[in-house]
Image (cartoon, rainbow, N blue to C red):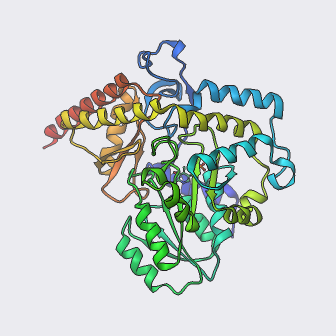
């Protein structure tokens, strides 16, 4: 019995609204430096101050970690390409949608991460949902970290492989599960940098387990590519996997990263051995049965990859801001714990859902926007502010965040004293 759509759906929506669980979009405009907003000092880039639902806010919620979404070279490359190549790809890559910029991008990405070949996808979501079912099926088993991203989980479900979830970064539990498995193929799947904690997967140890148990490893480097590694090569270089060692690892490795985060545009890619890439062209349905992304995006991404390699100051700035934030949280004796992370994801654990919403609202009243992350996205009692720093932020902006946090903490302490 369906009833009408609104009979069936509206009561649940109303329920969610009452419990403050309704997810809401804000309408966003990028505040340009020319407008002279107080939070846009000389060192800050566009993207650090956003007009959210009409109100300018100093924003710490973006994944554009290197500030490349507004890079003049990236924007110029997109403009040149749209004039030359047109607005759309006209067909799927396998028909007549694989344009010159797509080919150049794939070659640049493979060279950058040090693997033989690369294949580009529309998004990280499309890549993971395409790759996993292309490689494993009902006779196989997937071993998945408990904190993996939703699109890895959807890819696993679609594959119909048996699923073994192991506790976050628990190599002992993973070893036991691999030892017990009688599956035809075994695939370990993990975020390389976990999106809500900023913790890292131990990639070398996972590769050693693959050799020991004859398994494969898919790493999702959405938050590592561009940011980690001396030239932004990502998690493999960060863990010292280079040269001959990387070539050896690549025999069992499926490397995937997104291009809408540190690369500042949109898309994703998979890199690895030629056999892997050839196979995905034949079997990854999200690659085969979708119109290729507009060539202008590939052209913009090619400029972004060059900026990632050559503009090391962006990673240095990110590291300096991270150190400034950690120092400030300690010096101000804020009552919340900053989770240690080498990534731009700097979670500040507040605790209860009510408290985190109070802190988020308090910051918003101060003109600072930081997203709150609550269960079930993170475990009960660890609701947090997910501060993400970018190279578009300036040191005075991080000071503004710290001062706002201190004032909110002070107000909350005063209120608590009145209640008890
Ligand atoms: C954001 C994200 C994705 C999805 O990538 P999109 O390009 O945004 O679709 C995949 N995996 C992880 C770990 C992510 O954080």
Q: Which one is nearer the viewer's eye here, 238 or 129? A: 238
Task: Report the residue at 60% width, 35% height from top.
Answer: 306
Q: Position of residue 121 (x, y in %)?
A: 68, 52
Q: Position of residue 22 (x, y in %)?
A: 50, 49
Looking at the image, residue 229 sits to the left or right of residue 385; the answer is right
Q: Which one is nearer the viewer's eye here, 365 or 121? A: 121
Q: Residue furthest front?
A: 244
- Badge count: 0
Looking at the image, residue 413 sits to the left or right of residue 353; the answer is left
Q: Position of residue 205 (x, y in %)?
A: 40, 66
Task: Report the residue at 45% width, 29% height from top.
Answer: 313
Query: Where is 111 relative to 333, above or below?
Result: below
Q: Position of residue 139 (x, y in %)?
A: 62, 83
Query: Where is 398 relative to 326, above or below?
Result: above
* Residue 282, quarter of the rendered image: bottom right
Task: Report the residue at 67% width, 65% height from top.
Answer: 276
Image quadrant occupied by the C terminus: top left
* Residue 317, quarter of the rendered image: top left
Residue 108 appears in the figure: yes
Image quadrant occupied by the N terminus: bottom right
Residue 369 appears in the figure: no
Query: Where is 317 relative to 120, above or below?
Result: above
């Amino acid at each position: 019995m369906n009833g009408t759509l609104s009979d069936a759906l509206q009561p649940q929506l109303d329920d969610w609204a009452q419990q403050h669980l309704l997810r809401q979009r804000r309408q966003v405009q990028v505040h340009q430096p020319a407008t002279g907003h107080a939070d846009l000092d000389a060192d800050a880039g566009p993207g650090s101050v956003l007009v959210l639902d009409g109100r300018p806010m100093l924003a710490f919620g973006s994944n554009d970690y290197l500030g490349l979404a507004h890079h003049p070279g990236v924007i110029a490359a997109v403009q040149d390409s749209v004039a030359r190549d047109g607005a759309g790809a006209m067909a799927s890559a396998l028909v007549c949608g694989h344009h010159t910029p797509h080919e150049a991008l794939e070659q640049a990405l493979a060279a950058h991460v040090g693997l033989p070949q690369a294949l580009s996808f529309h998004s990280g979501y499309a890549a993971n949902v395409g790759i996993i079912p292309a490689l494993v099926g009902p006779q196989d088993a997937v071993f998945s970290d408990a904190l993996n991203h939703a699109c890895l989980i959807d890819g696993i479900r679609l594959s119909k492989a048996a699923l073994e979830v192991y506790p976050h970064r628990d190599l002992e539990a993973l070893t036991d599960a691999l030892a017990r498995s009688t599956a035809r193929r075994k695939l370990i799947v993990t975020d390389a940098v976990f999106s809500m904690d900023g913790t890292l997967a131990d990639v070398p140890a996972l590769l050693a387990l693959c050799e020991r148990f004859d398994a494969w490893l898919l790493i999702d480097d959405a938050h590592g590519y561009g940011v980690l590694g001396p030239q932004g090569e990502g998690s493999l270089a960060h863990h010292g996997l280079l040269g001959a060692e990387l070539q050896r690892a690549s025999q069992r490795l499926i490397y995937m990263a997104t291009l809408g985060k540190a690369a500042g545009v949109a898309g994703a890619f998979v890199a690895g051995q030629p056999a892997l890439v050839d196979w995905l062209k034949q079997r990854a349905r999200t690659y085969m049965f979708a119109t290729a992304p507009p060539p202008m995006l590939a052209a913009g991404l090619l400029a972004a990859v060059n900026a990632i390699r050559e503009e090391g100051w962006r990673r240095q700035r990110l590291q300096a801001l991270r150190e400034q934030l950690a120092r400030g949280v300690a010096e101000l004796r804020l009552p919340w714990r900053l989770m240690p992370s080498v990534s731009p994801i700097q979670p500040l654990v507040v605790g209860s859902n009510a408290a985190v919403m109070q802190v988020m609202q308090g910051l918003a009243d101060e003109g600072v926007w930081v997203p709150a992350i609550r269960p079930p996205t993170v475990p009960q009692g660890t609701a947090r502010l997910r501060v993400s720093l970018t190279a578009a932020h300036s040191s005075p902006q991080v000071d503004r965040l710290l001062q706002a946090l201190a004032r909110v903490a002070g107000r909350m302490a005063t209120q608590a004293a009145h209640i008890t």
